[in-house]
Image (cartoon, rainbow, N blue to C red):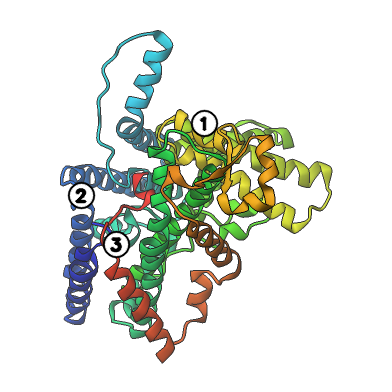
């Protein structure tokens, strides 16, 4: 079930909200929690019922391991706890590896060994990367004595809570669990309801009106066009960098909005990343919960494993963790390249700051950061390497440069330099208004307040109500072709 669907907006969400708070009002606290868990699992299994046993087994297994880690801490059984933690992490990694990376591994094995092993053709379970990382963090924290014993029902809600289940944020138990135990959160908070609907409407607008508009040109450029000329290629790449921005930002807003209806405040996961003036700042703004997880549970352990600290080892660890981050997004060499490009960007950033120590002009820093990420997203979006190379060739003018015909009086002499005048956007089926869309997107991401800033300034006013209703209705009336969120595929 998608946030941007009629059944979610007009059926699932209202019914879940009403029944949950009705049960709490009647002091049926356990039943309310059971209903919320059931609703979240129903939401998850809407796409495919066969996904349900997997997440149930994962939740049950990790709850038991976490429970034993906490229990044996009190009994001072340190060796057994270490073995349990190792077993728990291996189980989660194997589960993720089997469902997400088995065919990728076999394909590469066949290529290297010239063998012909059959692929499993396993359907990727929704959200497996998210709930796996979330539960690994829970196990590690249980081993480190950083959490308490929770009942199974509460743990199940923590993992499966529907606003953040499918595409994050990757929530930490310390951030979420206490909120479910807070008695005040079991009563309808009308300010949170108003704020939640307001933020949800903004997210819906970002997804339906902005991201899905850019998606048309992106799909034509990456998937349908045989070749791309210079301007077409740049429009295609810029369109995707804005599509993924508004798609993911829109999802984060809708997740925050839905959670607020239930008086749950999700951690910030997206904070104007295209305003960043360095790669380090960028990754502290983009998918913040993933960056925190990688730093805490991957980067730090790998750096510690390499022995005595050195700057060189730290840079190497950055590259390794970014490759892992890339691979987390999908079982493809293209995602690995995505990780490598961002890893190299971070390495250059850190090296410049520590060794060169020359201050870079903020605009130049922003330009380099934005276009480094743009370069990486070409591989992120491409389905095959040929698709990425097609876009890159076009961006470097390999397939020629076409300018609008009305430029002939001024720049007709450029025909002597192999510049062609004619239809500029023919291969991506766009018109000149695409440039206006791109310019508008630049203005929005670079000058407007983000949703978190808007949330913090929120006041219940008539103009806010009108704004919410207008963008909500406009988005609802535009739900002609309901599309998945990009991060649902991870």
Front position in the image: 451 or 66: 451
Q: Closer to the camera: disc 1 or disc 2? A: 1
Answer with mark 1 or mark 2, whichever residue precedes in sequence: 2
Do the numbered discs 1 and 2 sit on residues whose CB atoms are within 8 Å?
no
Residue at the image position 40 percent from the left and 19 percent from the top: 108
Residue at the image position 34 percent from the left and 31 percent from the top: 94
Do the numbered discs 2 and 3 sit on residues whose CB atoms are within 8 Å?
no
Q: Closer to the camera: disc 1 or disc 3? A: 1
The residue pinned by badge 3 equals: 3
Residue 425, how many percent across, how many down? 48, 47
- The image's mark for residue 41 is none
Q: Can residue 310 be seen in this snapshot?
A: no
Residue 458, how many percent across, how many down? 47, 82
Q: Secondary structure at mark 2?
A: loop
Residue 306, how many percent across, how many down? 63, 30
The residue pinned by badge 1 equals: 389
Answer with mark 2 or mark 3, whichever residue precedes in sequence: 3
| 413 lies above or below 264 | above
Would residue 119 be found to the left or right of residue 350 on screen? left
Give the residue at the far front of this rendering. Answer: 409
Disc 2 versus disc 3: distance between alpha carbons? 13 Å
Would residue 25 be found to the left or right of residue 146 on screen? left
- The image's mark for residue 47 is 2
Q: Secondary structure at mark 3?
A: loop
Residue 24 occupies which quadrant of the picture?
bottom left
Would residue 55 be found to the left or right of residue 198 on screen? left
Residue 455, how many percent across, how many down? 48, 76
Residue 61 occupies which quadrant of the picture?
top left
Front position in the image: 474 or 33: 474
| 168 lies above or below 318 | below
Identify the image quadrant of the N terminus: bottom left
Answer with mark 1 or mark 3, whichever residue precedes in sequence: 3
């Amino acid at each position: 079930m998608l946030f941007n669907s009629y059944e979610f907006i007009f059926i699932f969400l209202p019914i879940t909200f009403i029944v949950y708070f009705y049960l709490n009002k009647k002091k049926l606290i356990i039943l309310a929690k059971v209903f919320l868990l059931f609703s979240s699992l129903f939401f998850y299994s809407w796409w495919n019922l066969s996904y349900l046993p997997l997440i149930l087994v994962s939740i049950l297994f990790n709850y038991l391991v976490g429970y034993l880690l906490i229990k044996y801490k009190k009994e001072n059984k340190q060796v057994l706890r270490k073995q349990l933690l190792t077993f728990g992490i291996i189980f989660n990694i194997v589960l993720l590896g089997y469902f997400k990376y088995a065919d990728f591994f076999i394909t590469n094995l066949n290529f290297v060994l010239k063998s012909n092993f059959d692929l499993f053709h396993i359907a990727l379970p929704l959200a497996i990367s998210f709930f796996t990382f979330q539960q690994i963090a829970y196990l590690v924290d249980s081993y480190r004595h950083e959490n308490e014993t929770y009942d199974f029902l509460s743990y199940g809600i923590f993992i499966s809570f529907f606003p953040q289940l499918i595409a994050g944020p990757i929530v930490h138990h310390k951030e979420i669990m206490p909120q479910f135990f807070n008695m005040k959160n079991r009563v309808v908070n009308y300010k949170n309801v108003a704020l939640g609907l307001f933020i949800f409407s903004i997210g819906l607008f970002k997804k339906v009106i902005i991201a899905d508009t850019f998606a048309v040109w992106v799909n034509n450029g990456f998937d349908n066009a045989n070749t791309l000329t210079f301007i077409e290629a740049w429009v295609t790449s810029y369109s995707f960098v804005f599509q993924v921005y508004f798609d993911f930002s829109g999802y984060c807003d809708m997740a925050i909005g839905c959670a607020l209806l239930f008086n749950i405040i999700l951690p910030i996961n997206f904070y104007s990343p295209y305003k960043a003036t360095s790669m380090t700042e960028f990754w502290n703004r983009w998918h913040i919960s993933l960056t925190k997880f990688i730093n805490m549970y991957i980067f730090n352990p790998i750096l510690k494993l390499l022995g005595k600290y050195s700057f060189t080892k730290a840079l190497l660890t950055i590259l390794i963790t970014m490759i892992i981050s890339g691979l987390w997004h999908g079982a493809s060499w293209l995602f690995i390249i995505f990780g490598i490009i961002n890893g190299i960007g971070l390495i250059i950033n850190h090296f410049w700051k520590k060794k060169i120590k020359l201050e870079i002009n903020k605009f130049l820093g922003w330009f380099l950061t934005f276009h480094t990420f743009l370069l990486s997203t070409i591989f992120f979006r491409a389905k095959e390497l040929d698709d990425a190379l097609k876009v890159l060739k076009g961006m470097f003018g390999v397939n020629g440069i076409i300018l609008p015909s009305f430029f002939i009086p001024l720049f007709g002499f450029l025909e002597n330099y192999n510049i062609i005048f004619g239809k500029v956007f023919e291969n991506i089926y766009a018109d000149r208004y695409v440039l206006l869309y791109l310019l508008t997107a630049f203005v929005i991401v670079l000058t407007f307040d983000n949703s978190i800033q808007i949330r913090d300034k929120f006041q219940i006013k008539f103009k806010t109500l009108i704004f919410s209703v207008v963008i909500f209705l406009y988005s609802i009336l535009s739900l002609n072709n309901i599309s998945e969120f990009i991060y649902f595929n991870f």
